[in-house]
Amino acid sequence: MLGPGDDPSIPDDIVRTSGLTKRYGDFDALSDCSVRVARGEVFGLLGPNGAGKTTLIRSLLGYLRPTSGTSQIDGIDPQVDGVGLRSRVAYLPGDARLPRHMRGGGVLKFFSEIHPAGNLDRSAAIAEQLELNTRTRVAFMSTGMRQKLALSVVLGLETPLLILDEPTANLDPTVRAKVLDLVVAAQQRGRTVMFSSHVLSEIEETCDRVAFLRKGRLVHQLTISDLFQRHRVTAKASPDFDPAAMTVPSDLRSKVQVSTVKRGGQPMVCIDTAGDLAPLLTWIDSLRLAGIRIEPLGLRAVYDAVHFGDAVHLGDAVSAGNAGLGEGQVGQVKQDAR
Ligand SMILES: Nc1ncnc2c1ncn2[C@@H]1O[C@H](COP(=O)(O)OP(=O)(O)OP(=O)(O)O)[C@@H](O)[C@H]1O
């Protein structure tokens, strides 16, 4: 029988949690979290400040003892063999602390020697790629330089799993792009990457799947390739437009959700679609709407739906990957602040 977090669509997972919960007093920093990360994928963690991303990561690594539930990395339980588990993971903490008295090059050498998967040449090559001057002492480095140094240490480790907590924080756009290239390169070398970020575009560009955390709960997961198949069609609506009166052909019902939003006081019809757009176009054309705009739905809309209850139908609240629209839903009215 399948337990929580079990998902037959992910036959080979490297990360697995089941009902993972971390409670401080009567506050759940992480609540009943069951998730699986497939070997070789780039997996994103999204959520507002305080959602529980770091708590999940630190519990996975065995730095926090969960109140209940279990987790494994590569089949190892952190509470049973934390040292063995951490030798299989390169971890970039959100607040990486580096020895201030050392020069960059010394830091790279130190970590490549103490970690079983260390590789000084690789770390040095990454530092060069990130254009970091490794002769500078950590104490005299800018915040961004220290982040580059920490990334060089972590990305240089030849572990099967990389866990990066906000890897692009404090970096300029050029360096951000290079870091994302390094994440993709790590995946191409067969490594699994799990990373948290507040930058939706970089999750969209880099990840295969993304999980949304909210108030300690895993509230939604989606596959980015499914997201790219989703569109939002908006058009002007007359003031008396009633979305409930709109008929969606039965064969399209599972692929569309119709609602109305107000933008700048103007009522708009809003049709969210899933899957191939082509079969929907004839129906949309028959509606004789004015000022039609079609745009990719994008992670922003899903993020807003998860966090603010915006008008996007999410499909299954937590599914291992499929964010299909489910039954067509008609008639929501939302005030859109944007
Ligand atoms: N030691 C602690 N004692 C009490 N509460 C804690 C403790 N550590 C974390 N928390 C709380 O747990 C919640 C989740 O924190 P966590 O650091 O996991 O969030 P996060 O999603 O990583 O946030 P951010 O995006 O700001 O980094 C927060 O409300 C935080 O205040």
Image: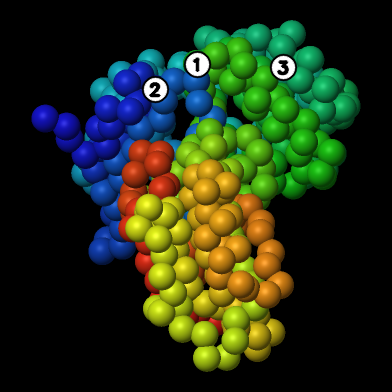
Question: Which tag, 1 or 2, sits closer to the chain's start?
Answer: 2
User: Given this view, does label 3 or label 1 mark the residue nearer the observer?
Assistant: 1
Using the rendered view, name the quadrant where residue 23 is placed. bottom left
Could you say which disc has been placed on residue 123 in the image? 3
In the image, residue 169 sits, relative to residue 186, either above or below, namely below
> Which residue has dot 1 on it?
160
Q: Are marks 1 and 2 in contact (CB under 8 Å)?
A: yes
Which amino acid is tagged 1? Pro
Using the rendered view, name the quadrant where residue 195 is placed. top right
> Which residue has dot 2 on it?
14
Of the 4 image quadrants, the one containing the N terminus is top left
As drawn, is 129 to the left or to the right of 338? right
Question: Which tag, 3 or 2, sits closer to the chain's start?
Answer: 2
* Residue situated in front as seen by the camera: 291 or 182: 291
As drawn, is 55 to the left or to the right of 177? left
- Number of residues whose C-alpha sits closer than 10 Å to that of mark 3, classed few (under 14), some (14–19) or many (20 or more): many
